[in-house]
Image (cartoon, helix red, strand yellow):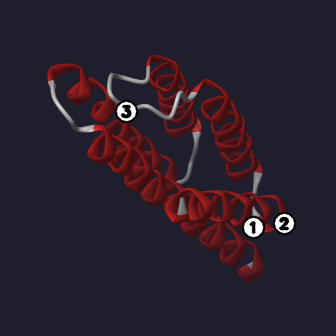
Amino acid sequence: MFLGLLSVAALVACCIIAATWGGRDERLAAFGFVAAGVASHLANTDRYGTTETGVLLIDAALLLGLLVLALRSDRFWPMWAAAFQLIGTTVHFASMTESGDFAKAYANALVFWFYPVVISLMVGTWLEARKRRQY
């Protein structure tokens, strides 16, 4: 419960920061994060006893978007965000191989890898704003 509320607060803060001080890339990523967050909330069954297929597809779509952004961007942070998202998406595939009571570990791993992705956007936004102030 607490991690869920913390992740929503981090997402909102990240998007406000990106919309206020970020450039085009930061705003695109923030939009993708919000879309993925809302879609994941709707697709999530909160059971985690088996692989959350809907959330897996949403995470894979976000990964694809971050990869495209990383390939087209002149900034470095999208590569970090895509790498962290890849690890988070891999958690879903790891859950496919596990049988037994792993629901809490699966859910916590998904939430855990959300934070580095958001932090990479925040750092990227901070660097972009700092670069703009210098010119």
- Between disc 3 and disc 1, the foreground one is 3
Disc 3: which residue: 89
> Of residues 126 and 96, which is closer to you in this image?
96
> Of residues 67 and 62, which is closer to you in this image?
62
Q: In this orientation, does residue 76 appear?
A: no
What secondary structure is found at the residue carrying circle 2?
A: helix
Q: Is residue 126 left or right of residue 103?
A: right
In the drawing, what numbered circle is on residue 17? 1
Query: Which of the marked residues, 3 or 2, is nearer the chain's N terminus?
Result: 2
Residue drawn at (15%, 24%) of the image = 99
> Of residues 19 and 93, which is closer to you in this image?
93
- Quote the CA–CA distance across marks 3 and 1: 25 Å
> Of residues 71 and 111, which is closer to you in this image?
111
- Between disc 3 and disc 2, the foreground one is 3
Q: Where does the image place residue 16, in percent across and percent down from the top left?
A: 79, 63
Please identify the quarter of the rendering in which residue 56 is found. top left
Residue drawn at (49%, 56%) of the image = 77
- Contact between marks 3 and 1 (CB within 8 A): the answer is no
In the image, residue 115 sits, relative to residue 93, either above or below, namely below
In the drawing, what numbered circle is on residue 20? 2
What secondary structure is found at the residue carrying circle 3?
A: helix
Residue drawn at (64%, 40%) of the image = 37
Callout 3: few (<14), some (14-19), or many (20+) C-alpha neighbours within 10 Å?
many
The amino acid on which the numbered mark 3 sits, given as a three-letter code, is: Thr
In the image, residue 55 sits, relative to residue 107, either above or below, namely above
In the drawing, what numbered circle is on residue 45? none
What secondary structure is found at the residue carrying circle 1?
A: helix
Q: Where does the image place residue 58, in percent across and percent down from the top left?
A: 55, 25
Residue drawn at (58%, 65%) of the image = 6
- Quote the CA–CA distance across marks 2 and 1: 5 Å
